[in-house]
């Protein structure tokens, strides 16, 4: 049996990320790629889905190069690999190639367990990426985010953030980063309330609800009221992003699933599932992409990248409303 790689060894020959939490899986990939490019700026990165890794593909990707370049090969949904491709991967694990880092993202569970066992036997660096279904886990995640960002947050503030945003880890991470960037000193419950709960939440999410249903004039009127009464601009961009993301998440969910099942899978309360279903009419995948780009541009402007943040928010609201009527 090969010696197990240290969890800190980002350039171990094999990294195995196990779980179904997309944010954590993506972070594993990002960390490995960043470490490889720090060692060699010309690192070649190949990011593949399971259906793209056919028999023979791995041997081709890991064949020796004349330039001995560093390479990172990422395989997503490794539990779905075909039996023949799994044989290729197992063969590779017996004799991994120097300067190549293989990253396998595996959902865990019974499907593809033979590959999981082989990777562990080969001494893979393993990172757990489980779904955070318990409120306590999400609270620990938020506290960890603030520590990683080098910021101090009170326990009450962390709990308030979880209560305000819910179970979506990406949105929780985004909120932590936003607060860390925008607030000086200790982040307390009053700061969280100012950004994400109470009146700020009502106003920001009212703007978002109107925009995603194509009611441009009403959304702009509500936005101008929010600006007039001094609502924090980052809270408004957060609400807009949340509204559009919710539509994108529900649009990609299995058809016919009941609200309770979707609530568990998507991290939304059942009442929100019903509301977003009503808001989805007229939306397309391209529309969601356009709207998210518009929100990202507004967010950059709000954080100092634009001369007129209020105008940038108005543009985002108009773009979202138009995107909702793209069909």
Image (tube, grey):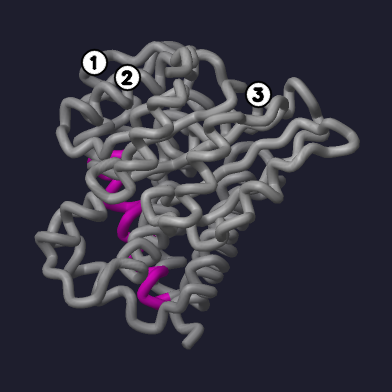
**Residue 29 at x, y percent in the picture:** 54, 36
N-terminal of the two: label 1 or label 2? 2
Q: Nearer the viewer, residue 207 or 262?
A: 262
At x 65%, y 28%, the residue is: 34
**Residue 25 at x, y percent in the picture:** 43, 38
Disc number for residue 241: none
Identify residue for label 2. Answer: 143
Q: Do tag 3 and tag 1 residues touch (Cβ < 8 Å)?
A: no
Packing grade of label 3 (10 A; few <14, some 14-19, many >=20) is some
Packing grade of label 1 (10 A; few <14, some 14-19, many >=20) is some
Q: Do tag 2 and tag 3 residues touch (Cβ < 8 Å)?
A: no
N-terminal of the two: label 3 or label 1? 3
Identify residue for label 1. Answer: 155
The label nearer to you, 2 versus 3, is 3
Q: Nearer the viewer, residue 167 or 24?
A: 24
Where does the magenta region start and end? 196-215
Check disc 2 and report its element: helix, strand or loop: helix
**With respect to residue 140, does 169 lie above or below?**
below
**With respect to residue 324, does 302 lie above or below?**
above
Q: Do tag 1 and tag 2 residues touch (Cβ < 8 Å)?
A: yes
Identify residue for label 3. Answer: 35
Q: CA distance from mark 2 to mark 3?
A: 25 Å
Q: Is residue 191 left or right of residue 288?
A: left
Magenta stretch, main secondary structure, is: helix
**With respect to residue 254, does 76 lie above or below?**
above
Check disc 3 and report its element: helix, strand or loop: helix
* Extreme residue toward the bottom, this view: 327
At x 40%, y 34%, the residue is: 118
Q: CA distance from mark 1 to mark 2?
A: 8 Å
Q: CA distance from mark 3 to mark 1?
A: 32 Å
**With respect to residue 166, does 161 lie above or below?**
above
């Amino acid at each position: 049996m090969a010696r197990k790689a240290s969890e800190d060894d980002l350039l171990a020959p094999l990294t195995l990320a196990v779980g179904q939490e997309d944010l954590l899986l993506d972070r594993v990939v990002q960390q490995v790629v960043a470490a490889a490019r720090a060692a060699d700026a010309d690192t070649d990165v190949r990011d593949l889905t399971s259906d793209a890794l056919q028999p023979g593909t791995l041997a081709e990707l890991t064949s020796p190069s004349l330039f001995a370049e560093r390479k990172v090969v990422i395989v997503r949904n490794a539990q779905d690999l075909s039996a023949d491709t799994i044989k290729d991967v197992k063969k590779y694990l017996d004799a991994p190639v120097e300067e190549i880092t293989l990253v396998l993202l595996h959902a865990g569970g019974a499907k593809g367990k033979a590959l999981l066992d082989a990777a562990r036997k080969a001494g893979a660096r393993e990172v757990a990426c489980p779904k955070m279904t318990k409120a306590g886990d999400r609270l620990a995640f938020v506290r960890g985010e603030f520590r990683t960002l080098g910021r101090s947050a009170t326990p009450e503030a962390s709990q308030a953030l979880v209560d305000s945003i819910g179970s979506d880890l990406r949105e929780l991470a985004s909120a932590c980063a936003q607060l860390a960037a925008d607030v000086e000193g200790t982040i307390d419950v009053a700061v969280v309330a100012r950004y994400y709960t109470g009146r700020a939440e009502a106003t920001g999410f009212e703007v978002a609800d109107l925009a995603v249903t194509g009611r441009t004039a009403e959304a702009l009127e509500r936005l101008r009221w929010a600006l007039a009464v001094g609502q924090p601009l980052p809270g408004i961009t957060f609400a807009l992003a949340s509204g559009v993301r919710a539509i994108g998440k529900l649009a990609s969910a299995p058809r016919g699933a009941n609200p309770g099942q979707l609530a568990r899978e998507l991290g939304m309360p059942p009442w929100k599932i019903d509301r977003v279903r009503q808001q989805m009419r007229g939306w397309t995948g391209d529309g969601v992409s356009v709207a998210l780009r518009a929100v990202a541009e507004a967010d950059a402007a709000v954080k100092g990248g634009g001369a007129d943040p209020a105008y940038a928010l108005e543009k985002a609201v108009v773009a979202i409303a138009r995107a909702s009527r793209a069909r």
